Image (cartoon, coloured by chain):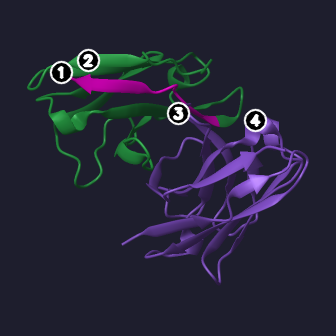
């Protein structure tokens, strides 16, 4: 059971918009700690997608965006493409546990 | 280009030891904290340990404290994870990852901007 809760799966059709939520608490996201997002393809290493809540590393298209609100964060993907199929993880820090945390991951399926 | 290459994984006996290495290139190694993150088969990511750029500060998750030791050789741009007292639940792919902050400090809220391909550790008799 992860401290950061993500839906196990989301589904969308090509061209659609999907959002992936990451729900925390007042000791992590709600305390103002940054949220980062990673994408992982099967058998591959995670890749940074969003850092500092809403910033995109160079090379990441603006179809990907991040936001936070209160004790939650969201990753939005617009103009869904077949190769967006992957598992997405959020990451933050918990000031009570004093350790970096990952969400349980959300598998995105593109119909 | 940043490259991180892990090695040292394999089969470990319960209660035994393994030493993982991560060879880094393409950046100023001493300027970045480094982390180890693991992923059990079919499961999500779990932060394991981290070390500051100087190597002077180390950090561990509770379940590995006293069993794992993280270290680095800045002259050789290498990161290590000495694992002892291995348990079945240590079975995972272990990734080394670079901290995004280039001042060398480790903060648990920093992002990890480059990852190695991972090395599999299997603990079984």
Q: Quadrant of residue A69?
A: top left
The subunit letter for the residue under badge 3 reads A
For label 3, count other residues whose C-alpha is less than 10 Å away and answer few (under 14), some (14-19) or many (20+).
many
- Mark carried by residue A92: 3
Q: In the rendered image, is residue B61 in sight?
A: no
**Residue marked by disc 2:** A11
For the residues beneath circles 2 and 4, the answer to whether they share a chain is no
CA distance for labels 3 and 1: 30 Å
CA distance for labels 2 and 4: 31 Å
At x 45% / y 69%, what residue is drawn?
Answer: B3
Chain B, colour shown: purple
Q: Which residues are magenta?
A: A100-111
The answer to the question of whether label 2 and label 4 lie on touching residues, with beta carbons closer than 8 A, is no
Q: How many marks?
A: 4
- Mark carried by residue B89: 4
Chain A, colour shown: green
């Amino acid at each position: 059971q992860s401290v950061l809760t993500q839906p196990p799966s989301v589904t969308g059709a090509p061209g659609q918009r999907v959002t992936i939520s990451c729900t925390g608490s007042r000791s992590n996201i709600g305390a103002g700690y940054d949220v980062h997002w990673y994408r992982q393809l099967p058998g591959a290493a995670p890749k940074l997608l969003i850092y500092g809540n809403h910033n995109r590393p160079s090379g990441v298209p603006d179809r990907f965006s991040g936001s936070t609100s209160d004790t939650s964060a969201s990753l939005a993907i617009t103009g869904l493409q077949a190769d967006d199929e992957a598992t997405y993880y959020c990451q933050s820090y918990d000031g009570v546990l004093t350790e970096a945390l990952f969400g349980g991951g959300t598998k995105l399926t593109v119909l | 280009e940043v490259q991180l290459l892990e090695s040292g994984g394999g089969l470990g006996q319960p209660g035994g030891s393994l030493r993982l290495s991560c060879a880094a290139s393409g950046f100023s190694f001493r300027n970045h904290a480094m982390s180890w993150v693991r992923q059990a088969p079919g499961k999500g990511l779990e932060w394991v340990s981290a070390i500051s750029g100087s190597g002077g500060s180390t950090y561990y998750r509770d379940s590995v404290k006293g069993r794992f030791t993280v270290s680095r050789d800045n002259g050789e741009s290498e990161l290590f994870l000495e694992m002892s007292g291995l348990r079945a639940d240590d079975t995972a792919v272990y990734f080394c990852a670079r901290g995004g902050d280039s001042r060398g400090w480790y903060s648990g809220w920093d992002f990890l901007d480059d990852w190695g391909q991972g090395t599999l550790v299997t603990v079984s008799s």
